[in-house]
Amino acid sequence: MAEMRSEEEQVEALKRWWKENGTSLIAGAAIAAAGVFGWKAWQDYQTGQAEAASATYQQLLTLSGQDSLDEGARQQAEQLVSSLAEEHGDSLYTDLARLLEARLAVQAGDTDAAKTALEALVSDAERPYLQGLARLRLARLQLAGDDAETALATLDGEIPAPLAAQRADIRGDAHLALGDREAARKAWQEALSLSQASDQPLYGVQLKLDDLGVEETS
């Protein structure tokens, strides 16, 4: 009898405990489940967004791989870039698309459109290497447009270390365009030194130095 009474007391105690705590336990479990499913849904959404951005970029890449683009194909490429910028503005694919957009514009002879694409990448990109690459390409376009002063100002922006030799090379071109041969020589020597230190050959720089009558550096 004592054992039965003990069991009944335990059951009654369990009922009282459940009455006092059961609701909060169910609510807690529901919240935990919602959190798990919510996180899974967010992960699925992010994966879907990345896949959509990748698919759009692949279309652009295929289009840009053609030997030449007619006006219709170029408009299609512009639409793909706009789609990436609007729907996946902070993705890597959007930054890469801006670089492609600039290249296609140059091929079409529209340097203003190319500059606009590169300027957008310089101002908006959150990836230092691509931002620096866009800055170098923008400076080259400015230099090609006889705007060496603006090119030098563009090159004064932040450039990642792996691109420093290229920056020095373009800076030398800009100084030479402005008639400052000594500044050009120093910039090109810096470009050679940086390329050798990083074991990244930079072709053509020694020829530029040779044209100035400067002996090869080691």
Image (tube, grey):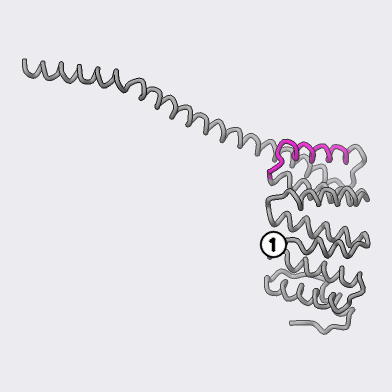
Estimate the x, y position of residue 62 in percent, counting from the top left: 79, 43
Residue drawn at x 79%, y 63% as measured from the top left: 155
The amino acid type of the residue labelled 1 equals: Pro
Estimate the x, y position of residue 5 in percent, counting from the top left: 10, 16
Q: Is residue 28 left or right of residue 98?
A: left
User: Relative to residue 32, is residue 115 depicted above or below?
Assistant: below
Residue furthest to the front: 20
Crowding at dot 1, Cα within 10 Å, few <14 / some 14-19 / many 20+, comes out as few
User: Relative to residue 134, is residue 26 depicted above or below?
Assistant: above
Residue drawn at x 74%, y 38% as measured from the top left: 56
- Residue indicated by mark 1: 160
Q: Main secondary structure of the magenta part?
A: helix
Residue drawn at x 83%, y 50% as measured from the top left: 102
Magenta-colored stretch includes residue 11: no
Q: Is residue 152 left or right of residue 95?
A: right
Magenta-colored stretch includes residue 90: yes
Residue stretch in magenta: 73-91
